[in-house]
Image (cartoon, helix red, strand yellow):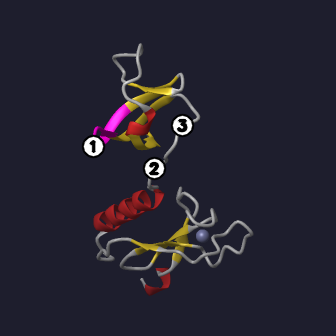
Amino acid sequence: MAKETGKIIKESLRPCPFCNGEVALADMGHYWLITRASGMKTATMCKCRVFMESDSFHAHDKEEKQKAKEKVIKAWNTRPNPWHTGNPTEEGDYLVKLDVERHVYPYYVLKWSKGGWYSHYDMDYPACPQHSVLKWQKIVEG
Ligand SMILES: [Zn+2]
């Protein structure tokens, strides 16, 4: 199966997180490799040579190979959800890190609305002063 090594396979991979360039999945025989596809000399190709290797698999074990493939694609397509400070610009639900009178709540869900932070069950008064929210991130579904 040596001639199969390095074969590029089209998959739904998100672009490179650094340059937004295209990447591809290559079958390396005993592991999968996600990186720029050197055969793909397009302007949109990833330029930073970043790569991600899958778990290794036995070449004859189709099930193990498939599992390694799904796992590395999922890992590649996962992006960290960044934290922000200050006030959000859009209304909605946010995961927040709260500091209320020196008691830190690392994960708390609040609603940003009408220029303040509200809990879901009380939209009459803000749940806490704005400076209590140390940082926030958008809640990403799925
Ligand atoms: Zn790149």
User: What's the amino acid at mark 2?
Assistant: Trp
Residue under label 2: 83
Q: Nearer the viewer, mark 2 or mark 1?
A: 1
In the image, 68 versus 104, the foreground residue is 104
Outermost residue to the front: 101
Tags 2 and 1 touching, CB below 8 Å: no
Q: Earlier in the sequence, mark 3 or mark 2?
A: 2
User: What's the amino acid at mark 3?
Assistant: Pro
| Image x and y of residue 12, in percent | 53, 56
Quarter where residue 139 is shown: top left
Q: At x 45% / y 49%, what residue is drawn? A: 83
Q: Earlier in the sequence, mark 3 or mark 1?
A: 3
Residue 20 versus residue 59 in the image, above or below: above
Report helix, strand or loop for mark 1: loop
Report helix, strand or loop for mark 2: loop
Ligand 1 is within 8 Å of the C-beta of the residue at disc 2? no
Segment tinted magenta in the rendering: 99-109
Residue 87 as seen in the image, left or right of residue 38: left
